[in-house]
Image (cartoon, rainbow, N blue to C red):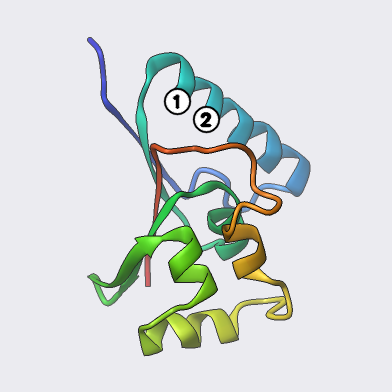
Amino acid sequence: MEPELLIADEAVSALDVSVQKQVLKLLDEIRQRLNLAVLFITHDLRVAAQICDYVAVMSKGRVVEYGSAEQVFGSPRDEYTKALFAAAPGRNWEFGKFATGVTRPAKRSRLRSTRKA
């Protein structure tokens, strides 16, 4: 069996930061070793901004915005996405800064994220 996709649904929610880091590192190692795409489903915008190349924002079961992490975090178009960022804990945190690759690890071309409403 050679899977092409790993679905990680809330894989790091409710974990402390140090354990989150370990799980994210493990997911990336698995992704690289098996050449997998990862669908990373999360409510944690900070994690998504740091690890995902593409982001889909969902509201009420529908995708309301989709694009590169740089585009979605740096310049959101949808009103729901803008409201979501404004309501995020620590909203002074610069999502766009992380999504532009300034501090994000090297290219993770197959990592994906969705946001559940």
In this view of the protein, can residue 56 be seen by the observer? Answer: no
**Mark 2 secondary-structure assignment:** helix
| Picture quadrant of residue 60 | bottom left
- Residue visible at 67% across and 47% down in the picture: 15
Quick one: 57 or 103, which is closer to the camera? 103
- Establish if 75 lies above or below 37: below
Q: Position of residue 7 (x, y in %)?
A: 35, 38
Q: Nearer the viewer, mark 1 or mark 2?
A: 1
**Horizontally, is 8 left or right of 88 in the view?**
left
- Which residue lies under the disc numbered 2? 27
- Establish if 72 lies above or below 52: below
**Mark 1 secondary-structure assignment:** helix
- Residue visible at 35% across and 26% down in the picture: 36
Q: Position of residue 71 (x, y in %)?
A: 45, 68
Q: Which residue lies most toward the right here?
A: 18
In this view of the protein, can residue 35 be seen by the observer? Answer: yes
Kind of residue sitting beneath label 2: Leu
Between the C-alphas of marks 1 and 2, the distance is 6 Å
Task: For the C terminus, give its image quadrant.
Answer: bottom left
Quick one: 101 or 20, which is closer to the camera? 101
**Residue 1 numbered mark, or none:** none
**Dot 1 crowding, Cα within 10 Å, few <14, some 14–19, many 20+:** some
Q: Which residue lies most toward the top here?
A: 1
Q: Position of residue 45 (x, y in %)?
A: 56, 64
| Picture quadrant of residue 105 | top right
**Dot 2 crowding, Cα within 10 Å, few <14, some 14–19, many 20+:** some
Q: Position of residue 41 (x, y in %)?
A: 41, 52
Task: Tell me whether circle 1 and circle 2 mark residues in contact (CB < 8 Å).
Answer: yes
**Residue 31 numbered mark, or none:** 1
Task: For the N terminus, give its image quadrant.
Answer: top left
